[in-house]
Amino acid sequence: MQIKFNIGKNLNHVRKRRRLSLDKVAELTGVSKAMLGQIERGESTPTINVLWKIATGLKVSFSSLLANREEDKDTLLIQYSETTPIIEEHGQMRIFSQFIFDSNRGFEVFIIELEPSCSHRSDPHDEGVEEYISLIEGVLEVTIGEDVYVLNKGDAIRYLANKEHIYRNLTDKQISFHHIIYYFS
């Protein structure tokens, strides 16, 4: 799977550019040195929550760990059929990176697909991270801290991502939504 090699290469690049040891990265991220080594060597594909721990600890965007394309062109076409998703929740959740983080723009864009009854919990992110969801198809329950919201096709929500948040497909069909992460710190 190509994505695990991209993640490993990008993690190694950030670590070496900052002259950090695996021990120091483990300390900053809360991810074990052994796991970080496996990720860098392309031997392990981290979960989304582990990727978030790494991104948060190293103060880089989530999508910068996934990047495998040049985004500095005037026009950039991303073809869904050529995008390799991150697969979570035992194959029940797929995350397609569409536009990786660019510091000039301040955001990254994903399409997320959830199979029937799939639920995904995301740990709180750092202050200064805001998430936007626009539901393409289905019915999605979004829990932010203690507050629960139900989105129907075409609905959208924006929230600060510094609280635990949970996405749950309330239907018996696959649902999909655009997911934009904006870094305003």
Image: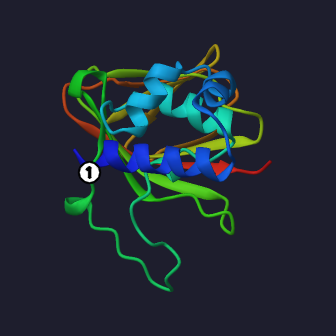
Q: Residue 50: give x, y in percent of width and height.
A: 49, 26
Q: Quadrant of residue 149?
A: top right
Residue type for callout 1:
Thr
Q: Secondary structure at mark 1?
A: loop
Q: Residue at x 65, y 51 (%)?
A: 182
Please provide percent x and percent y for residue 68.
39, 61
Location of the N terminus by quadrant is top left
Q: Is residue 160 visible?
A: no
Q: Quadrant of residue 58?
A: top right
Q: Relative to the observer, which residue lies in front, 64 or 135?
A: 64
Residue 11: image location, x then y, percent: 51, 44
Q: x, y (%) of residue 169?
A: 33, 26
Name the residue that disc number 1 marks.
84
71 or 120: nearer the viewer: 71
Q: Residue at 57% x, 58% y: name it.
A: 101
- Residue at 39% x, 45% y: name it: 177
